[in-house]
Structures are given as structure tokens and as C-alpha cells.
Image (cartoon, rainbow, N blue to C red):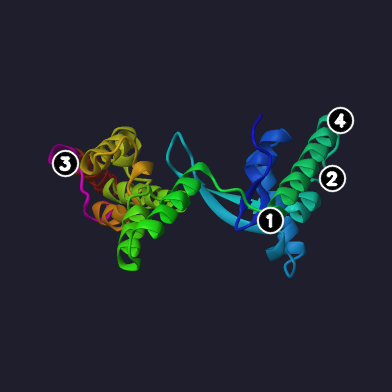
């Protein structure tokens, strides 16, 4: 079953995409409903809804979505009717209550965190304070980047590729984006010797950002981009 709710900044939330999926509605209609709620309750809306974006898995474009807490969810679905709608209302409310209850309980360390904690204790027992600090820093640096940093890399790379193609409205973007996006990520993974970009070591995160800033398509691809975009300019000039 798809996850109904999740945590964001220590708060239980769900997304407008989840609502559209489970209540069988178009996402644009859900967004419009939230926009109307915000307009009517501008003073309180900031505590109910949070606007953000996501990257579509297929076309790699950035789209708008909302995250909302339990009160925002309740206000949004209040007018949704039907047996299925009622079932999902109950499912969501139970999911909110369960995760909120779990958040209040003492946090259980993940396997990786337990390993790090165990290694820290071992170092403290066998090394001087100076050696201990040095090893802990090295341990943390060799961890992979966080989910937040992974999202930052993805968005920055997507914007860079779109820029190199001449923008989303450029002919080169329409014809070459499906091949240029994979080329970029293959080069990125090859440069850092990792199976996927999310495995980038934490200590190399800044280097990953610099790689994106410095990246350019190879010469053949660059010429193909220029030719496609130049052709549109020439066609426009002839039409004028």
C-alpha cells in the first residue's frame, strides 16, 4: 500500500499528490482547492499548508505541490463525498494519529546510526580525545549524502541541463532532453565512481555541486544543440 503520511521537519504531513491519487482526483484540481482555501484563510494557512515542488520521474520537469498537516488535510477533504472517500478519510486520520503517536515515543536508532554510535564508543575507549575526534570526523565524512542533499543535487543538475539545452521551450530541449539527461548522470557517476548519484560521499557533496556548475555537453552534443536552436532562430527570421 502506498504511504499515506510521512514526516517533514518533525511534523506528520501528507501531500496534495497523495490526496489526488487516493481520492481519484486530478492533481491540478486538488491544487486549485488548496489555493482557494489559502485565499480564504490567509492568516492561518501557513500553519496548514506548505507549498513546495517535486521533479517528475519521467520528464524530469519541476512541478508544484502542497504538503499539509492533519488540520490542513481535514479542511481540504471535508467536502469529499462517497463511500470510497469516507474510507480514505478514516484511513488517513488513523495514519496521522498513528505516526503522531510514534513521533512522541523515544526515537529508535537506525542500523547505520547504531553502527556509528557503537564505533564512537569503541574509539572513545581506545584512543585519546584527539584521535577520537579525528576518527569520528573521518567516519562522518565517508557517509553518503543525506536525502535533502540528494534532492539539492538533483534539482541543481536538472536546471543546469535545461540551461545547456537553451531552456524548456527550446527545440533542443524538446528533441534531446531524453538523451542528454542520462548522459549527464552517467558522467557524474563515472567521475565519482559510484553506482548512483545518491551514493555520493558526504565529504564530496560540495565537489558534486562544482561538477554540476562546470559541466557542459560534449562537443558533438553541443553542436547539435546549437544547430537545433539556431535553426529556429533562422526560421523565425525568415517568417518575419
Work out how far the residue at label 2 is from the one at label 3, CA to CA, in angstroms. Answer: 54 Å
Q: Position of residue 61 (x, y in %)?
A: 44, 43
Which of the pair 103/161 is nearer the observer? Answer: 103
Q: Is the magenta stretch mostly helix, strand or loop?
A: helix
Q: Position of residue 220 (x, y in %)?
A: 14, 37
From this view, report whether residue 29 is shown above or below residue 46: above
Work out how far the residue at label 4 is from the one at label 3, CA to CA, in angstroms. Answer: 56 Å
> Which of marks 1 and 3 precedes in the sequence?
1
Q: Residue furthest front?
A: 126
Q: Mark 2 points at which residue?
A: 79
Determine the residue positioned at 71% across, 64% down: 47
Determine the residue positioned at 33% across, 41% down: 173
Q: Position of residue 226 (x, y in %)?
A: 20, 44
Work out how far the residue at label 3 is from the one at label 1, CA to CA, in angstroms. Answer: 43 Å
Q: Name the residue under label 4.
A: 83
Q: Name the residue under label 3.
A: 218
Total count of labels? 4
Question: Which disc, if any, is residue 35?
Answer: 1
> Which of marks 1 and 2 precedes in the sequence?
1
Which of the pair 197/26 is nearer the observer? Answer: 197
Q: Badges 1 and 4: C-beta atoms under 8 Å apart?
A: no
Q: What element carries label 1?
A: helix
115 vs 180, left or right, is right
Q: From the viewer's perspective, is the residue at label 2 or at label 4 nearer?
A: 4
| Location of residue 38 (image quadrant) | bottom right
Over which residues does the magenta segment extend? 212-221
Amino acid at each position: 500500500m502506498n504511504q499515506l503520511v510521512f514526516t517533514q521537519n518533525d511534523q506528520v504531513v501528507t501531500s496534495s499528490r497523495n490526496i489526488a491519487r487516493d481520492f481519484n482526483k486530478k492533481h491540478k484540481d486538488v491544487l486549485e482547492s488548496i489555493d482557494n482555501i489559502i485565499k480564504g484563510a490567509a492568516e492561518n494557512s501557513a500553519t496548514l499548508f506548505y507549498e513546495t515542488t517535486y521533479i517528475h520521474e519521467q520528464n524530469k520537469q519541476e512541478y508544484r505541490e502542497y504538503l499539509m498537516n492533519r488540520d490542513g488535510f481535514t479542511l481540504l477533504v471535508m467536502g469529499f463525498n462517497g463511500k470510497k472517500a469516507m474510507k480514505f478519510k478514516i484511513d488517513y486520520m488513523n495514519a496521522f494519529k498513528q505516526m503522531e503517536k510514534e513521533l512522541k515515543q523515544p526515537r529508535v536508532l537506525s542500523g547505520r546510526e547504531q553502527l556509528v554510535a557503537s564505533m564512537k564508543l569503541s574509539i572513545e575507549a581506545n584512543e585519546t580525545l584527539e584521535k577520537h575526534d579525528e576518527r569520528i570526523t573521518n567516519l562522518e565524512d565517508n557517509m553518503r549524502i543525506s536525502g535533502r542533499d540528494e534532492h539539492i543535487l538533483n534539482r541543481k543538475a536538472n536546471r543546469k541541463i535545461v540551461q545547456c539545452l537553451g531552456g524548456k521551450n527550446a527545440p533542443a530541449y524538446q528533441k534531446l532532453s531524453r538523451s542528454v539527461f542520462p548522459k549527464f548522470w552517467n558522467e557524474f557517476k563515472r567521475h565519482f565512481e559510484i553506482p548512483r548519484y545518491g551514493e555520493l560521499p558526504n565529504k564530496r557533496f560540495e565537489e558534486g555541486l562544482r561538477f554540476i556548475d562546470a559541466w557542459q555537453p560534449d562537443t558533438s552534443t553541443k553542436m547539435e544543440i546549437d544547430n537545433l536552436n539556431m535553426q529556429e532562430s533562422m526560421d523565425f527570421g525568415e517568417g518575419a
